[in-house]
Amino acid sequence: MPSIALNEGDAFECASDDTLLRAGLRAGFGIPYECDVGACGTCKVELIAGAVASNWPDAPGLSARDKARNRVLACQSRPTSDCRIKVRLQEESRPTFVRPRVFRRG
């Protein structure tokens, strides 16, 4: 399973059939996003090292200039190798995990 290094040291694992965004959120990182379909561009990250495959290469959230600067959409990118990305993590994007209640009859 590819390892995704963030900024200066944190990392998470991402299956090759999963997106950087979903895996990062599951790992508890506040990767910013809004639409999760490639339209808004909120989840842009800079690919510093490694390679990704895009679910939607012509997504409107990513301009030709972004592509020239090695930016990818985390919501549309699946890792094909270990990667290092630069991303501005946001506390408000960090997932909140709610512990499910257990009801017992008795």
Image (cartoon, grey):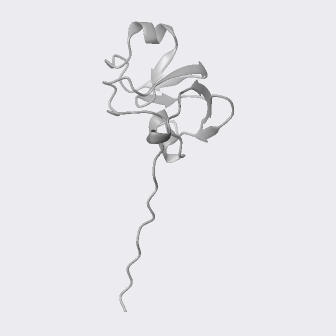
Q: Nearer the viewer, residue 69 or 96?
A: 96
Q: In x, y percent, where is residue 81?
A: 59, 28
Residue extending farthest right:
9
Residue extending farthest front:
92
Q: Nearer the viewer, residue 77 or 32?
A: 32
Query: Which quadrant of the figure contains the N terminus?
Result: top right
Is residue 94 found left or right of 6 in the rendered image? left
Residue at coordinates 32% horizontally, 24% vertically from top-left? 40
Residue 19 seen in render: no
Q: Is residue 96 above or below residue 1?
A: below
Q: Nearer the viewer, residue 59 or 101?
A: 101
Residue 31 seen in render: yes
Q: Is residue 95 above or below residue 68?
A: below
Residue at coordinates 40% horizontally, 72% vertically from top-left? 101
Is residue 41 found left or right of 30 in the rendered image? left
Q: Is residue 60 above or below residue 3?
A: above
Q: In x, y percent, where is residue 19?
A: 45, 35
Q: Nearer the viewer, residue 80 or 104?
A: 104
Q: In x, y percent, where is residue 42?
A: 39, 26
Residue at coordinates 49% horizontally, 47% vertically from top-left? 26
Query: Which quadrant of the figure contains the C terminus?
Result: bottom left
Q: In x, y percent, where is residue 33?
A: 40, 33
